[in-house]
Image: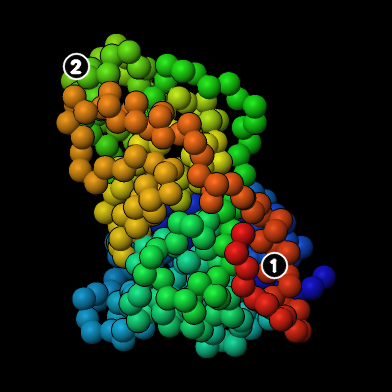
Amino acid sequence: MSRPIGYYVHHHGDGHRQRAIAIGQSLDNVMLMGSGLAHGTGNLPFLDLPDDRFDDSFAGIDHVDRPSSLHYAPLDHEGLRQRSAQMTGWIAEARPRLMVVDVSAEVAMLARIASVPTVYVRLSGSRLDVAHLDAFRGAIALLAPFHDALDDDETPGWVRDKTFYAPGIVRSASQNISVNDEVVLVVLGRGGGISNGEHWAAAARAAPTWQWHIIGPCTVPADMPANLYLRGWVDDADAQIAAARVVIGAAGDGVVSAVLRARRPFICLPEPRPFDEQASKAERLAAVGAAIVRHDWPKPHEWPDLIGRAIEQNEQWPACLESESGPERVARWLDDLCAPAVSNRSHIA
């Protein structure tokens, strides 16, 4: 068996883990590593790392001076010490041929210092700070899990040239699903907080001809409209997205990828994120004609018009979003990067 590929998985949200599983299942020898992986890795081997956040288990000092090439570097944090030791211990023993980092500037630097070639996963947004640019420079290549047409306008040319654009890494299990023309689906992801059910109740009352289904964390409104259904967490989010007439959601990787795969009309309400990740992605979706975007919360009477505009916009799908990659293509690219000589380490889908 060849030397393994390490794959670091960030704990926030679920898109990092889903990408890692999809790509890992197409590789011969991979080791996932991150915090909280014990709840599911698709039968792939994993190294479950101690948490690096602040809680009762790990003391530490934050808000101290740190090098500009690091995003998060509290002092005297036992979790950080342990996870760094576990990762470098595995590197020393397994001698990985490559490390995919999805995402952490600190882990990318740690792997590079340990003499491991890294592939850094580029997320959306304006990531022009020193820490991100150093992570990009230190990697042998960059992986963007989105279409090149959705890349931020401010992304430097050298970063684009180093990037392998790979939309559609996580495939949907739902195929040939019939659309329910009466359903507006609200998708609430793991990366945000609990949504306010009163807001959605007001929206449902303002658009009574639609059945409003909400999946994900949401409070229960005091007065539940008859056309509002709170589904909570579901195991078939992709199928429900594919079956909805219109989808409403933030601009996280999971919901955007599922909406684009299913080519559904989309009303995008980007949430605040570091480096304007969701705002940037939403603006690019609007620019290419793939979403109706609102950065403020719509008033109740605006919802019928927003739904109609999304349906009308969706009648002509943007050609720049036609292609998808699939995990096998990414796995082949990673294997090629490990070869002794690689003439071209970037590609646009």
Under tag 1, what secondary structure? helix
Left/right placement of residue 83 relative to residue 341 reads left
List x then y, in percent, for residue 229. 35, 20
State yes or no: discs 2 and 1 in contact (Cβ < 8 Å): no
Residue 18 sits above or below residue 102 on the image: above
List x then y, in percent, for residue 293. 31, 43
**Can I make out residue 316 in this image?**
yes
Nearer the observer: mark 2 or 1; the answer is 1
**Residue sticking out furthest to the right:** 1
List x then y, in percent, for residue 331. 70, 62
Residue under the point 27% across and 27% down: 305
Residue 329 sits above or below residue 135 on the image: above
Q: Earlier in the sequence, mark 2 or mark 1?
A: 2
List x then y, in percent, for residue 27. 73, 61
Residue 121 sits above or below residue 222 on the image: below
| Nearest to the observer: residue 92 or residue 143 | 143
**Can I make out residue 40 in this image?**
no
Under tag 2, what secondary structure? loop
State how far apart marks 2 and 1 are (Cα).
Answer: 53 Å
| Nearest to the observer: residue 85 or residue 226 | 226
Left/right placement of residue 277 relative to residue 116 reads left
Left/right placement of residue 288 relative to residue 320 reads left
Left/right placement of residue 161 relative to residue 197 reads right
Disc sitting over residue 333 in the figure: 1
Residue under the point 49% across and 18% down: 180
Label 2: few (<14), some or many (≥20) within 10 Å? few
Q: Which residue is mark 2?
A: 223
Indicate the amino acid at tag 1: Trp
Q: How is the image coloured?
A: rainbow
Residue under the point 76% across and 79% down: 339
Indicate the amino acid at tag 2: Asp
Q: Residue 161 falls in which quadrant of the image?
A: bottom right
